[in-house]
Image (cartoon, rainbow, N blue to C red):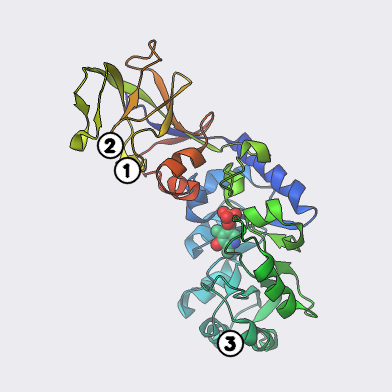
Amino acid sequence: MSRPLIARIHPAALQNNLAVARRHARGARIMAVVKANGYGHGLRRVAQALWNADGFAVLSLEEAVSLRDLGWDKPILLLEGMFDVTELAECMAQRVTLVVHHAEQIAMLERARPASPLPVFLKLNSGMNRLGFRPRDFHAALARITASPNVGEVTLMSHFATADEAAGVSGQLEIIQAVFANLHHPVSLANSAALLRYRTTRRDWVRPGIMLYGASPFVEEDAHALDLQPAMTLSSRIIAVQTLAPGEAVGYGAGFIADRPVRVGVVACGYADGYPRHAGTGTPVLVNGQRTHTLGRVSMDMLCADLTGIPGAGVGAPVVLWGAGLPVEEVAAAAGTISYELLCAVAQRVPMSEA
Ligand SMILES: *Cc1c(COP(=O)(O)O)cnc(C)c1O
C-alpha cells in the first residue's frame, strides 16, 4: 500500500462556490483568480471546474499558455502584467489582458510592434501601496495608454487592502471614486471579501479568489455561513499508535508531555507535505470523523493526534487534516496564518485526485 496522504479536489464544490460568487456579483463579470496553481488545487483541474467563469486571472504567461492549451477562449488577466519586453510578443500571441501598473510597462507597450492591440487593466494605487499609479499620476497614465495604437480596451482597476477587516473599503473607495469620476471605462475592484461584503465595489468585473476554493476571507464569519464548500480535503491515515504513560513525551523537543495515560495516533502528514510546522499542540484534526487535536511538534513526515475519546481509532483510521468537516481556516488560525498560505503550500509530493 502507498502512503495514505492525499489531497482530494471537489469539482462540485468549486462549481457551487462560483455560483455563490455569481449571486453576489449581480451581473458583474467574474474574473476567477486561479494564480498559484489554482490556490494549490491544480490549475487545469480548477479551470475545468470553473469553465463558466467569464475570465481567469493568473500571474505568469506560462499559466496563461496552459489555459489556452485547455481550449480556454475567454479573457486571461495577467495580474502583474509583463515583466519584460520580451514577453510582449507571446502575450499578444496568447491574447492575454495585461495589468499595467507602472510607467515602465507603458513604455514597453509603446515600443512594441504588435500585430493587434492588447487589452489592458490600468491599475490605480488607492492605498494598498503595492502596485499601481498614484491618484495624481493616474490620468496621465490613462491618457498615455489610450493614445497608444498598441492598446485595445482599457479597464480601470484597483485592489483593497482591508476588505476582510473592520477597516473595510470606504477609505480606498472614496479615492477610487474621485479618480475614476467621469472616466467611461469598465471598472474592476472587488476581491472575495469585497464581493461578499460591499455591494458598491461590484462594478463590471469582480475578481474572487479564495471564496471559489471554499474558504472564508473573514475571521469572524465562516465559509459555511457564506454557503461556501471546501474544494480541497487533505486526508491521511493513522500509521502507528503509541500509549504514553504519565510523564512521557512525544515528538521532537518533547513538545508534549502526558499528564495521564494518553493514546497517540501517528499520522502520515508533516511539514514536507505543506502542513504548517507552526501549528502547535491543540490544532484541530478529525480522526474517524471525530474532532480531536494534534499533540507536540509537527515533524517532516508525521504529526501526532490525541486519540483520547476515540477508542475505536487504531492503525489505518482515516484522518482529515482540513477540508470536508474541518475548515482550513481553523487550522490556519491555529498556526498563526491564513487559509491561502496552507492551500498554496500543499507539496508536490502529495498526490492529488478528484472526488
Ligand atoms: C489574488 C488577487 C485577488 C483575489 O483575492 P482573494 O482574496 O483571494 O479573493 C484579486 N485581485 C488581485 C489583484 C489579486 O492579486
Q: Determine whether the residue tagged by mark 3 lies in a helix, strand or loop.
A: helix
Q: Determine whether the residue tagged by mark 1 lies in a helix, strand or loop.
A: loop
Q: Is mark 1 within 8 Å of ligand 1?
A: no
Q: Residues within 10 Å of mark 1 (few under 14, many from 20)?
A: some
Q: Quadrant of the C terminus?
A: top right
- In this image, 182 relative to 275: left or right? right
User: What label does residue 277 carry, if any?
Assistant: 1
Residue 195, image x and y in percent?
Answer: 69, 54
Q: CA distance from mark 1 to mark 3?
A: 48 Å
Q: Is residue 113 above or below residue 33?
A: below
User: What label does residue 181 carry, if any?
Assistant: none
Contact between labelled residues 2 and 1, with CB atoms less than 8 Å apart: yes
Q: Quadrant of residue 310?
A: top left
Q: Quadrant of residue 269?
A: top left
- Which sits in the foreground, 83 or 135? 135
Of the two numbered discs 3 and 2 in the rendering, the one whose residue sits closer to the viewer: 2
- Which sits in the foreground, 173 or 150? 173
- In this image, 149 relative to 342: left or right? right
Q: Quadrant of the N terminus?
A: top left
User: What label does residue 297 carry, if any?
Assistant: 2
Q: Circle 3 sits on which residue?
A: 110
The outermost residue toward the top is 312
Q: Is residue 291 above or below residue 147?
A: above
Q: Determine whether the residue tagged by mark 2 lies in a helix, strand or loop.
A: loop
Is any part of residue 138 visible from this angle? yes
Is any part of residue 33 visible from this angle? no
Residue 341, image x and y in percent?
Answer: 44, 50
Instruction: Tell me which image quadrant ligand 1 sits in.
Output: bottom right
- In this image, 188 relative to 3: left or right? right
Q: Residue at x 59, y 72 (%)?
A: 99
Q: Amino acid at mark 2?
A: Arg
